[in-house]
Image: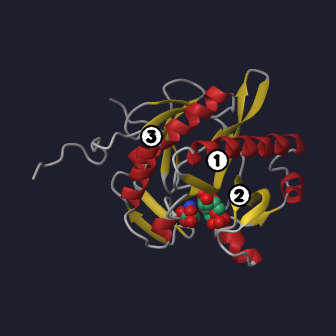
């Protein structure tokens, strides 16, 4: 066995060289972070759940013709992905006021927005991922106007899909974040959805109880993050209620 080459290590995931050219392996860690890494804990089994939830969502997007970097899940914590040139933006789509927009604009959390709103943040931890406008993106060349059109249309398509998916299991999609990349194939380039889509990168509220079912549980210390993510996975039909081989392997039966 030879050691894999690590390409990049982020807060919640690591990327390794893939088995063939143009591919990478995306490994989901158990690290939970918030507030630009100031709050950090290891949540046993979170990586396994996010790998499964993200696989589920990206597979469905691929089937619907929304291009993504996802190829297939390899094991409990890893998936095979297409190598892309990451565009340094966090693309946030919001349906309901919560989080930073509620604070910034003085909106009451839970207010439905007049329409879905797309925001861009520049991905730079040292700067705390500042909110930017389309002008900044094109002026600094982070994406061209045509690419920005493609990114916005991906955001809208993902929002439509996720809204319906979650509504079907009693969950309101408040907002979410995606990242996009350029995928090159011969002479062709297309913009695809990259990174992950999981309760780490969405705000999800139970339709009836308004209970939070996402990383806000960790940000705001509201309870067990792993039980929350397991609930989301079970509702989506990814895990059966008895499936518990999620964390570190065999469990002692007491
Ligand atoms: P915000 O309200 O804090 O700006 O977050 C908007 C959405 O983006 C929310 O669903 C959480 C997600 N998000 C990330 O995935 N990563 C981040 O670094 C931040 C700040 C938010
Ligand atoms: N993902 C960011 C962090 O790790 C911020 C967040 O999601 O709240 O700090």
The reply to whether the C-beta atoms of the residues labelled 2 and 1 are less than 8 Å apart is yes
Instruction: Name the residue beneath numbered marker 1.
Output: 163
- In this image, 241 relative to 59: left or right? left
User: How much space separates mark 2 and mark 3, taking CA atoms?
Assistant: 25 Å
The reply to whether the C-beta atoms of the residues labelled 2 and 3 are less than 8 Å apart is no
Of the numbered discs 2 and 3, the one sitting upstream in the chain is: 3
User: How much space separates mark 2 and mark 1, taking CA atoms?
Assistant: 9 Å
Question: Where's ligand 2: which quadrant?
Answer: bottom right
Q: Residue furthest bottom?
A: 106
Which residue occupies the foreground of this view, 55 or 134?
55
State which quadrant residue 168 falls in. Answer: top right
- In this image, 156 relative to 219: left or right? right
Of the numbered discs 2 and 1, the one sitting upstream in the chain is: 2
Q: Is residue 196 visible?
A: no
Measured as percent of width and height from the top left, residue 155 is found at 73, 46
Helix, strand or loop at mark 2: strand
């Amino acid at each position: 066995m030879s050691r894999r080459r690590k390409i990049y290590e982020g807060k919640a995931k690591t990327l390794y060289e893939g088995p063939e050219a143009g591919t990478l392996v995306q490994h989901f860690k158990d690290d939970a972070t918030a507030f630009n890494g100031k709050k950090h804990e290891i949540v046993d089994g979170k990586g396994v759940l996010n790998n499964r939830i993200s696989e589920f969502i990206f597979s469905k997007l691929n089937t619907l013709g929304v291009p993504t970097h996802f190829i297939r899940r390899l094991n409990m914590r890893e998936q095979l992905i297409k190598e892309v040139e990451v565009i340094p933006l966090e693309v946030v789509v919001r349906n309901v006021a919560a989080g930073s927009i509620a604070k910034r604009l003085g909106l009451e959390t839970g207010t439905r927005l007049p329409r879905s709103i797309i925001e861009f943040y520049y991905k730079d931890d040292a700067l705390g991922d500042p909110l930017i406008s389309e002008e900044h993106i094109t002026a600094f060349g982070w994406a061209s106007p045509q690419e920005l059109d493609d990114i916005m249309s991906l955001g809208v398509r993902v929002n439509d899909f996720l809204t319906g998916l979650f509504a079907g299991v009693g969950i309101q999609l408040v907002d979410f974040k995606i990242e996009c990349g350029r995928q090159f194939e011969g002479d062709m380039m297309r913009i695809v959805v990259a990174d992950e889509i999981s309760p780490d990168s969405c705000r999800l509220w139970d339709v009836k109880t308004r209970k939070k079912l996402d990383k806000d549980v960790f940000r705001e210390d509201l309870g067990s993050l792993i039980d929350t993510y397991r609930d989301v996975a079970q509702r989506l039909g990814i895990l059966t209620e008895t499936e518990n081989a999620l964390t570190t392997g065999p469990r002692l039966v007491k």
